[in-house]
Image: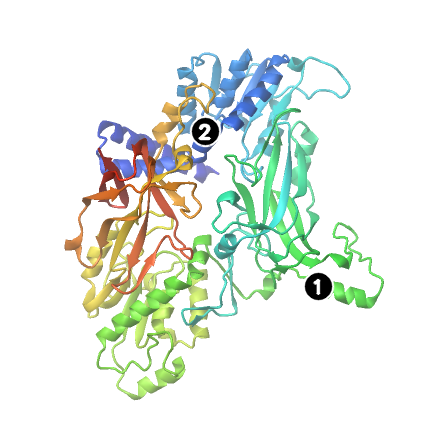
Amino acid sequence: MGEHLFRMGFRDEAAGYFHKAVKLNPDFADAKENFYRVANWLVERWHFIMLNDTKRNLTYLKAIENVVHSGCKSVLDIGTGTGILSIFAKKAGAPYVYACELSKTMYELACDVVAANNMGSEIKIFHLKSLDLEIPKHIPERVSLVVTETVDAGLFGEGIVESLIHAWEHLLLPPKPKNQDIPPKEYGQVIPASATVFGMAVECKEIRRHHRVGSREVAGVRLADAVQFFSPTGAAGSPEEAEPYTTEKLSRVPGGYVPLTEPCQVMTVDFNNLQELKSLAVRKPWKLSLPVTHGGILDAVVVWFVLQLDDEHALSTSPSEESCWEQAVYPVQDLPDYSVESGDTVTIEVACQDCYLKIQKVSLGPLECGMDFSNRDNTLNLSNEAELCNALAGLQTTGEQDARGQVCVLESTEIALLNNIPYHECFRAAMGKVLSSLNPSKDLQTMDVDGRGSGLNHEESQSKSSLDAAPDPFYILDVSEGFSLLPIIAGKLGSVKAYSSVEKEQHQTALNMISEANNFPKETLEFWLSHLEDENVVLQRPKSDKLWSIIILDVIETSGLIQQEVMEKAAISRCLLHSGGKIFPQYVLVYGMLVESQSLLLESAVQGTEPTLGFNIAPFINQFKVPVRVYLDLSTLPCVALSKPAELLRLDLMNPLLNSSSREVKVQVCKSGQVTAIPFWYHIHLDEEHSLSTSDKSSHWKQAAVVLDEPIQVKLGDELVLHVQHHKSNISITVKQ
């Protein structure tokens, strides 16, 4: 926790300096880029979406008004953010309003917001966790209402249970006694009053490809059966250090999703009941059975909730609701089979641990087994031995830890990369082409350039080549980030010494096991960082008298941005290649198009005072807006294309003379409308014949978009001139008026 707070404090301070530098010199590109990166950490992007959610704001306002108008006198807003709920309480007429906020940036922003709305002297804001508030040190006496929205997609992840237990014990008046009619100012209550959590099993290819490896062979490389890949997020069988869930806006997930079960009530929680809140932490895990109503592939259990603010007002985070909320996703991993049929049962084990809602186990079984998973004595109500055998045969459970072999935990983007077959096939073909050109006199029998191979296995080809004079190997360096199979793919292309830059010991072990499964001699694959005296100088010769045949660089972040300092790395790499050697990719083309997208506007900045019900919040939060939105899926982004894709920029890693840091591009408007944003993506050219697009369905990369400060009205046939600039990792696109 202390380290986390240290990091937060550092970022606050860094953002302050960058923000000041940008204000002093708006054209200072380095300061702008650094501020944008820090701003994403400091002010989460969901603040903009939430503040633009008029329905959410109005529902909270009405619930607060109900309580205050009934006689509640004092209000505490826990985790105030921009201060909007405190402002609602003051507007409703509460005589005393207090608020607390842990983030220094958000605390200062809230102070500015309440002052701008002429409530600076009427709302007392503390730069503290609610757990550190004391009576009478900070607040003179216990309050009659706590308002909070310290909930995440999984309900409990922002610490609402811990903060409300503390509030009931130290900050709130006692709850209303049953069957007694006393005025609201004399008892304590919480908004939201309660929550109901729902769950549903789904099939979703997009979730699957980010959390399960789909093939045991990638571009001719067999993945060792003994290596079991897991994402850090998992419902079943994932490692102990796993994140309990990830989040998705299911209504916008590429390829959509299919419900396999009806929604099931997972649990309820009464935020006005101290004993119930305390019991959550010690509650034993419980099992729920979800009858399968639609056959398919089980990919995840999806969870959402209904927040009951009071008796009249509720907010739902359901995937079928149009709201600012995402859903909690528990990917299913480590089952022998993921197929389900109508009539089967998905059984989940649910727990509230460490103030997180966790789904610890998932199992499948036919409904007709008649197994009561909630039975505490674990007995089976089956009439004969045959029925028992059938039940056990039909029941599929998670694998045990000791039966898994080597566990290799990969980030979800790394698993999506492993599942990106065109990526690996493209690299295999391009690397084979380079090695063929570097060794034209050899018949390349041992190489597997076109994917068909030579008819010899690796051991035979190694034996054959050893009869001849052993040639110098081709040196290949892969410095792409994360887990990469490319060095092993390169090792199958002939006399190659491939160096991987993976750092994690677990990843190195997995790559070694995969090498062995493909009959590689140990010297074929080495780990580059173990050869370096200074790990900060990754780009250097393989040996004092040798140069590289191929250097593989990471050019595009999975977020959709260009990697930092990639052109500087390319300049160094060019000096380390022997004649005919190549950098991969050799060049990158940036493509973009004009779109009209209300969604991008709402996700990037608060749109005036209307969504915040007339209160002046936008100018303060919008100081932290970032012109480039990242991690977008253009295939599901709600938008209207107003132009065809256009080439915006070329980044050439092999021929720097072909680069320009800025250029002007004319774009024809093909549909009338308002240009609100310019999404962009990349065509990554390994050479002239082999390229990858970061917008393909199989891509592990997301896309990005520049969101314009002011929409531009255009008509069919108009021509817009875009001024495109590239500085380090930042692409700026402005419309030349």
- From the image, which quarter does the C terminus lie in? top left
Residue 676 seen in this snapshot:
yes
Q: Which mark, by number, is residue 296? A: none
User: Along the polypeptide, which appears first: circle 1 or circle 2?
Assistant: 2
Q: Residue at x 36, y 82 (%)?
A: 454
Q: Nearer the viewer, residue 729 or 306?
A: 306
Is any atom of residue 138 visible in this view? no
SS of the residue at dot 2? loop
Q: Is residue 231 left or right of residue 656?
A: right
Q: Residue at x 33, y 80 (%)?
A: 446
Residue pictured at 70% horizontal, 59% vertical: 365
At which x and y percent is residue 449?
A: 33, 74
Q: Which residue has dot 2 on it?
A: 52
Which residue, as the protein is rendered here, is positioned at the far front? 717
Q: What residue is pinned by disc 1? A: 394
Residue at (72% x, 13% y) in the render: 182
Where on the picture, by quarter, is residue 313? top right
SS at circle 1: helix
- Please state the horizontal and vertical placement of residue 61, each as a whole percent of the image: 55, 21
Residue 347: horizontal and vertical position, in percent? 68, 53
